[in-house]
Amino acid sequence: MYYFLKKKWNRNGRPLPLRIFFSLPYSAESNFSFCFYFTSLIYTYTPIDMFRRSLFAFAAAADKVLLFGSAKSRTPEQRKIYKQLQQTTIEAAFPHIAACWVGPCWGTVMQTPANLAPICAKRAVWRCSQCHEEFEMGISKFINEGGVCPVCHKQQKRRRRPAEGGAKGKAAAAAGDEAETYERAPRMIHSNYQSVLYTNAEWETKNVQPMLAQRWELVSDQLLQKSAAGESVSLLASPKIDGIRCMVGYNKAQKNIVFFSRGGIVLECCHGIEQQLEPLFARDPTLMLTGSSFAPECNFEQLNGFVRRLRKTSTPEVRLAQDRLLEYFAFDIMYSQLLSAPDAPFEERYRLLKQLIPTCGAKRISNYVHDEKKKKRIRDSARLANAVVNAQGDKKVKVYHVPAARVHPEEMESVLQEACSQGFEGVMLRRPEFPYEHGKRSFGLLKYKQMHDAEYKIVGFVAGEGKFKGGMGAFVCETKGGLRFHAPPKVSLERRLALWKERSELMGKYVTIQYQELSSQDVPRFPIAKSVRGGNNKQEWL
């Protein structure tokens, strides 16, 4: 056996440490050489490297202690910690890690450390407080490993805010009551739109995500059974407005009213509504309303164009149209210091809403009915000519509250039919005793909509992505007017995989599409593929 020395350069042209290679004489009988084996083994690491790595491996095994471990191998202490972390937020439990937050890799910018649990498995972008490098990492993984940066392998900094001057500051310092402070990482910035949190850091400390609705069908049987058994089950039913979800609050730093979407994007279209809301926020700057931005005289496409138009791309004519047409319909209160508690039930929130905004918006919307060809046709032009005015009689009212009437579960079908006959999209049901649940699909808020069915020809297919990769993503369907749209099938992953293999057989057939309503161009809105028309054996049903 012999050895030799060889120098190797890295990609930057700098020499790496000398490596020692061991080689054995070539053996003709075995037709191979140990030289290749030993060379490839030792070529990667020098003896010093191997020694260092053995130390690192030992240190990692000893030092890498997970905070709450993994599901299969948690110790009793880790299980206890995991259970505690389910009830808190990143901001509350790990402020030094929360300061590294740049933004989520899913959802919207409204997802912040102030409303996410440390055990959340989703990925986010972080900025290390040590090396200032940005990286993607799962929330629970980052916290579980002690906030160690995968780039510089250091933990995040902890700093203490210096004590304030004066007797109060000295007393706090003597008591050891010094608050921790951290340099916050820069947040994600949308290329076109402005985040509502970008200029309002105060809102990052509280959850300003709207509550989302569950489907009535999920709990209807349960509530009907309770009602049939003699239990008192009451619901508060409101008409469902076909508008765009819009929250409104007061930015104390900039001293202005801010309208923002469900995704946390600032809406720059509601300048004509601000003046009528100013007295409410002057009385209660903590007030935050949730409702819909709506234009009764416009179809949905026109409304969407008005609401999402940026100030920098708006013409004077568009600004005037926004001012004249857009109105605000509030249906709940997210925050207010006038409530008895932060978790006040809807019954109390609704009473306060009617006090703040006394004008009811039901009649305003019911002037318009849905038509198969023209979606928002004026029912009574004379009534519309005399627009609602305020108490002084000098200004058109642009802010309304959405009414909520008490109903029982067995009345829901008739309530839905009545709402749809008046031009509403459906019915929203609220359970009076439920608090406002920010960012959740709550069973305290239920939606019940009338859906329509129609058959459309299949002219193509879209491959699935993400968890549906390898399966059917959507059918490409065509209207009688030649317009195309995508309709995803509401089926299991296994069935999507099968449909993708069968797509050549499905081409040209007709599929039943369930949709909410038709657009102004007769294209289904929110289409879902239910079944492919075929034989009586229903083998082609999705």
Image (cartoon, rainbow, N blue to C red):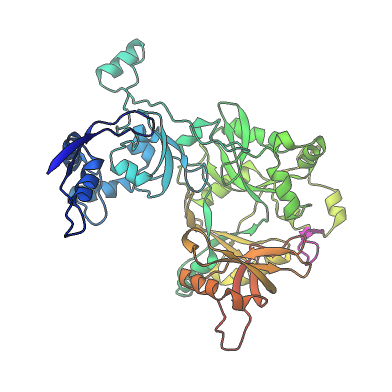
Q: Can residue 115 be seen from the camera position used here?
A: no
Q: Give how far across and how far down residue 47 sits, in percent.
A: 17, 36
State the predominant SS element of the stretch in magenta.
Answer: loop
Depth order, front residue of 323/235: 323
Instruction: Answer left or right for 172 relative to 269.
Output: left
The span shown in magenta is 368-377
Instruction: Answer left or right for 205 relative to 10.
Output: right
Q: Give how far across and how far down residue 149 sits, in percent.
A: 33, 36
Q: Give how far across and how far down residue 62 sits, in percent.
A: 16, 40
Queried whether the magenta region covers residue 423, the answer comes back as: no
Q: As displayed, is residue 163 above or below residue 9? A: above
Outermost residue on the left side: it is 1
Queried whether the magenta region covers residue 376, the answer comes back as: yes
Image quarter in which the C terminus is found: bottom right
Q: As displayed, is residue 21 above or below residue 479? A: above
Outermost residue on the bottom side: it is 536
| Residue 55, image quadrant | top left
Number of marks in the rendered image? 0
